[in-house]
Amino acid sequence: MNEKMDDRKLTILNAVIRTYLETGEPVGSRTISKYTDLKLSSATIRNEMSDLEEMGYLMQPHTSAGRIPTDKGYHFYVDQLEENRSSSVEAMNSLLIAKTNRMEEILKKVVKMLALNTNYTTMISAPSVKRNKVKFIQLSRINEKQLLNVVVIDGNVVKNHIIDVKEGISDEQILRLNLLLNTRLNGLSLADINLGLISNIKEEAGDHSDIVSDVLDTIAEVIRAETDENMEIYTSGANNIFRYPELADSQRAAQLITTLEEKEGLADILQSDDDENRGIQVYIGEESPVESMKDCSIGTATYDLGDGMQGTIGIIGPKRMDYEKAMDNLKQVKQSLNDVFKNNSPAD
C-alpha cells in the first residue's frame, strides 16, 4: 500500500468506488460529503480526491465531472475485500458459536449481518426436518371416468383429489394400482421419491402411468403445503430496496415491503425441491415465483445442519445485482452454518 494512503484517503477512495458501483456515474465531492461521516468540507474532499488521482487510484473523465475508479483503484478495492474476507468468516463463526441456546436469535443475527454485508434485502428460513412421509394412498371409483385419490401423510394430514380417467379402468386394475402405490411409496418423504423410482412405478403401471403422475402430484402438493405452512422465515434489510431507483418508486416498494412483512409467497422461494442440487439458485425477473418480485433478482442457497435439518438463505436485489458479491456471501453463510452447527449444537 502507498505510504500516503492514510485512513481519510482510504475512506474517500472506498466511498467513491462503492458509489460508482451503485450508480455508474462519476462521483463528486458533495456526494462523498453526504456518503461518509468524515464531516469534511467539499473543498477538503476535492483535495483528497485530487491526491488519489495523482496516486493513480481515480481518474476524471471530463474536466467538470466527478471521479471514477481506475484499474488500479479497482484492484486496490478487490485486494481489500480479499484481506477482509477471512476476518469476516471468523466473525461469522464467532457469532454462530456464541453461547446461545436459541436458533431463532442466531438466524436473526445471521440474516441481519448478510443484509449489512450485501446492501440487499435478505431472508432465511429456520431449519426443518423433512419428515413428512406418505402413510397411505387410496384410489376408489367415483364413476367410469373419475377416480377419488386420497393421500394421507404423517400427522394424519389428508388430501382428496379427483382424477379424470382417459381410458376405462377395471376394479382389478384399481386394486393393482393401490397395491403398487402403497408398496412403493408408503414411508417415503418427498425427498425419497426420486426420478428413478417414479420411472419404475410408471413402467409397472403400464397404460395407467398418467394416474400415477396425478397421485405423485397430489403427494407433492400436500407435503409442500404442510411444510410451507410451518416454515419460519426471518427477513432483514427491507429498507435496502430504496437504494435502487428501479425498485424504489412508491408502488413497487410498497408491494415488496408488504411481501416481506407478511412473508406471503416467500416459502415458494425458500422451499427447495431439488435435493440433489445444493448449490446456488438464481431467479431473475420473470423467473421469480413471487409476483411483487418480478423486477428483482433472487439468489438462494440451502444449508444443511445434518440429520435432515435443512433451511434456505435468500438475497433479494435489483436485476443489476452484484451477483459475484451476493453469491460469495451466500456461500460463506451456507458453509458457516453447515460447519458450525454440525459440530456445535446451539444448545451446548
Image (cartoon, rainbow, N blue to C red):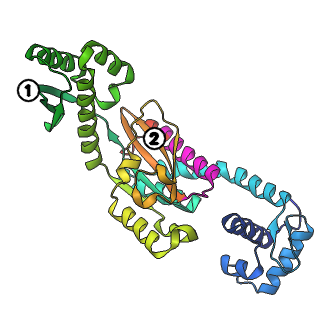
Q: Which residues are magenta?
A: 318-339
Verify whether residue 52 appears in magenta: no
Residue where numbered disc 1 is placed = 141
Q: Nearer the viewer, residue 344 or 221?
A: 221
Q: Give the residue at x 34% y 30%.
A: 191
How many marks the image carries: the answer is 2
* Residue 1 in picture, x, y percent from top left: 85, 58
Q: Give the dominant element type of the magenta stretch: helix, strand or loop.
A: helix
Cα distance in 3D space between marks 2 and 1: 43 Å
Residue nearer the viewer, 37 or 96 = 37
**Magenta highlight on residue 325:** yes
Q: Is residue 340 left or right of residue 163?
A: right
Left or right of 146 on screen, residue 230: right
Label 1, secondary structure: give it: strand
Could you tell me the amino acid type at mark 1?
Arg
Q: Earlier in the sequence, mark 2 or mark 1?
A: 1
Residue 27 appears in the rendering: yes
- Residue that protrudes farthest toward the right in the picture: 54
- Residue tagged 2: 303
